[in-house]
Image: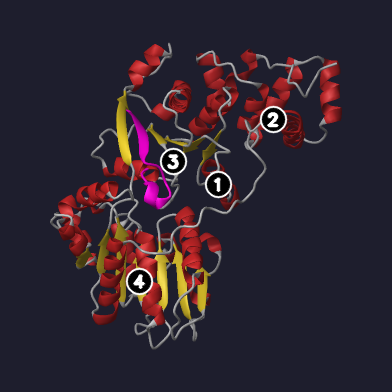
Amino acid sequence: MMKIMDESFSLKKVKLHNIGLMGSAIKDCNLDLSTIEIIRYCINDDKLVKKLYTIIKDSISEADFKIFKKSYPGLPKESLMNYLNSYQYSRVATKKSQQFHSNIRRLLSIKKPKELREYQKECSNLIQSKLQDSNDDILLVLPTGGGKTKVALDAIINYIDNSEKPLNILWMVHSVPLCNQAEEAIISSWQEPRLGGKNQKLWLNKLNEGAQKLSNIQFDDFSSFTVATPDTFKDNLEMDEDFTPFDLIVCDEAHHGIAEQERVYSKIRPKQKLGLTATPELNKDNVKFNTIYKKMLVPKDYLSKHGKKPKISTLSKDMKSILVKEKFLSTETIVKYYAAHEADVLDLTFESSKPWQKQPSSSIMMAELAKKMYEEGNCKRILVFCQEINQARLCAGILRDKGISAAAIYSGLKRIERNSRLDGLSTEHFNVLISVDILREGVDIPLVDGIIVFRRNVREESDPMFTQIIGRGLRGPRSGGTEKCLVWHVV
C-alpha cells in the first residue's frame, strides 16, 4: 500500500515540465523537489492544480490512486489541499517540524518605544509650527529607519489636540499594503496615552480596497484620518469649489507619482500638504517636486550638534552616519556577487542579459545564496528581494526542501497572511522571507540581520532603491534591532 504520509511516492519528472517556473527548473536544471513542495507551488493556480492531479494519477499505480482519492476526496484542488494539510499535521504531531508554512496566525509585534528621539522631537516641533502658523506645503526628509511616520503622526495628533475645531486629515500612500500599515500606525498612535485636548474622538476612514467612497464620508464634529491611494481619486469628483474636505493631506513616500499627487491635489484642494520621504532623489524632476512642497524640513539643530551641515544633498548620508554611531541604525557589510559567476559555480545555465525572473536557474541561485547566508553568515532572519512571484515561491520551496524555513511574501496575499509571515520572521518561525513587490519601504522588521538583493534593475549601490531595500535590515540595537546586517548584492 502506498504510504502517503511519509511521501514515499514520487512524480514522474518527464510530466512536470509544464507546471510553471518550477516545472522548467525540474526539467532544465534537473532540480529534485519533493511532492509536497510541488503541490504547494501549484495549489493556488487552478490550471496547475488540474495538471498536477493528472500527473499524480499517471505517476502511481491504479490501486494507489484509488487509495489517494478515498483518503483525500473532492475536486482536484480540495483533494490536494486535504493531502497537504494532513501531511503538515502529521509532521507537527510526530516531529514538531517548522519546515512548512503554518496555519494563518497573528502574533503581537514587539512594542516600539513611545518616546521620540531628539531629532524626531525637533522634526515634530517643526511640523507643528508650520501647520499652526503658516500655509506652507512642507516635505519632511529623514533617512530610511529614521521614523518619518512616527514623527508625522506625533506632530499631527498634537496639532489635532490643540485645534479649536475638528480637523480632517487624508493620509495618502501609493499601495494598498502601505495603506494597511498606515491604518495600524494611526490606531496605535491615537490609542497611546495623551495629555488630552479639545478633540478626544477620531474617525478612521478607509477609501482603499473599495471600502467606501469619498462622497459617502460624513465630516462631522469629530476629527478624522482618511487612508487612501491616489487611484481612489481617478474618477472625476463633483464638488463645490468652496468645499475643501481635508485640512491636511499627508503623502507618504512622496517621491512616488508626482503627477498623480498634482492630480489629486487639484481635485480636493487641501489647505496644506505634508510630504514624507527618505529619498527625494528618487524623483528625477526636482523642479516639479519643489512646486508641490515649498519647504523642506530637516533636523538642523541635531545635525549641527554632530558637526554636520543641513544640506539636502548629503542629508541621508550624514543622518545615517550619526544614527549608526548612536546605535539607532545598524552597520551594514555589503558584499557583491556576480550572477554569471554563481551560475558557473552551480553548473547552471543562466544569461545575465535576459530577464532573470524568467530563468528557473535564478530561483536556484537565490536559494543557494540564502542557504549560504543562513549557514555560513550565521544570519537567522533573512530578506531576499526578487522580481516575480513564481520566482519567489520556487525559491521558498527549494529552501524548505533543504531544511530552511522559508516563505514568499507579495501583495497578492491576503493581509492577514502577509502579517502572519512577517510575524513569523520576527519570531524566527521563518528564517527567510522572499519578497517580490512589498517590504521595500514602509515596513519595520527590526531583527532582520541578512538581506539579499537579487533584482536586475538595481545595479548600483548608489541607487536610491538599493538604499530603501537595505533599510529594512538597518534597525540598530536602540531601535530593537541588530548591531550588524549582512547585505549581499547580486549583479
The amino acid type of the residue labelled 3 equals Val
Up the image or down, 232 lies above or below 451; here it is below
> In the picture, residue 44 is in which quadrant?
top right
Q: Which mark is residue 448?
A: 3
Is label 3 in a helix, a strand or a loop?
A: loop
The foreground one among 323 and 411 is 323
- Quick one: quadrant of the C terminus? top left
The residue mark sitting in front, 2 or 1, is 1
Residue 131 in the image: state x and y as whole percent: 29, 76
Q: Circle 2 is placed at which residue position?
A: 50
Which of the two discs, 2 and 4, labels the residue nearer the N terminus?
A: 2
Which of the two discs, 3 and 2, labels the residue nearer the N terminus?
A: 2
The amino acid type of the residue labelled 4 equals Ala
The amino acid type of the residue labelled 1 equals Asp
Residue 302 in the image: state x and y as whole percent: 21, 61
Residue 211 in the image: state x and y as whole percent: 56, 65
Up the image or down, 29 lies above or below 169; here it is above
Which of the two discs, 4 and 3, labels the residue nearer the N terminus?
A: 4
Q: Which mark is residue 443?
A: none
> In the picture, residue 171 is in which quadrant?
bottom left
Read off the magenta span: 474-490
Marks 1 & 4, CB-CB < 8 Å contact = no
CA gap, disc 3 and disc 2:
38 Å
Marks 2 & 1, CB-CB < 8 Å contact = no
Q: Can residue 441 be seen by looking at this rendering?
A: no
Q: Which mark is residue 423?
A: 1
The residue mark sitting in front, 2 or 4, is 4
Other-residue count near label 4 (Cα within 10 Å), few / some / many at <14 / 14–19 / ≥20: many
CA gap, disc 2 and disc 4:
54 Å
CA gap, disc 1 and disc 4:
28 Å
Q: Circle 4 is placed at which residue position?
A: 155
